Image: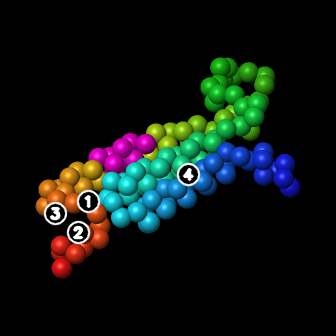
Amino acid sequence: MFDFILSRYNYWIYIILMMIGLYAMIGKKNLIKKIIGMNIFQTAIILFFISTAAKRGGTLPIIEHAHGAHPIQAASYVNPLPHVLMLTAIVVMVSTLGVALAIVIAIYRRYNTLEEDEILNLKR
């Protein structure tokens, strides 16, 4: 059992990163810290999905000879779909970060603070 847990250490790292990001988003009151937590959370998810595409002994999904005597064994190739989807997720992550920072700048210009409690008190 202990060997099984140790052999999956990368998943434990992703879980720890996700929990750090989730704690920062929920537990912190500073808006910049919340954005950093969101970015850590998104990064952990991207790393998780990329690791699911890894395969021991897998080769690149490039077929050199389309017509040959050897049948194509799809199970021996690495799946490129998670990598392609995570490229899209990285673009979305950067875009989300940019929009969140722009909103934080607007909030700071209006309320002169980035603390959630102070902003809520000023709105009342």
User: Horizontally, is 58 left or right of 26 in the view?
Assistant: right
Residue placed under numbered mark 2 in the picture: 119
Q: Amino acid at mark 4?
A: Leu
For the magenta stretch, what is the residue range? Answer: 90-98
Which labelled disc corresponds to residue 114? 1
Residue placed under numbered mark 3 in the picture: 111
* 92 in magenta: yes
Q: Position of residue 6 (x, y in %)?
A: 78, 47
The picture quadrant where one finds residue 115 is bottom left
**Image point 18% across, 73% down: which residue?**
122
Tags 1 and 2 touching, CB below 8 Å = yes
Q: Amino acid at mark 1?
A: Leu
Tags 2 and 3 touching, CB below 8 Å = yes
**Image point 18% across, 75% down: which residue?**
123
Q: CA distance from mark 4 to mark 3?
A: 32 Å
Q: CA distance from mark 1 to mark 2?
A: 7 Å
User: Is 70 in front, or is 99?
Assistant: 99
**Image point 27% across, 50% down: which residue?**
101
Circle nearer the viewer, 4 or 3:
3
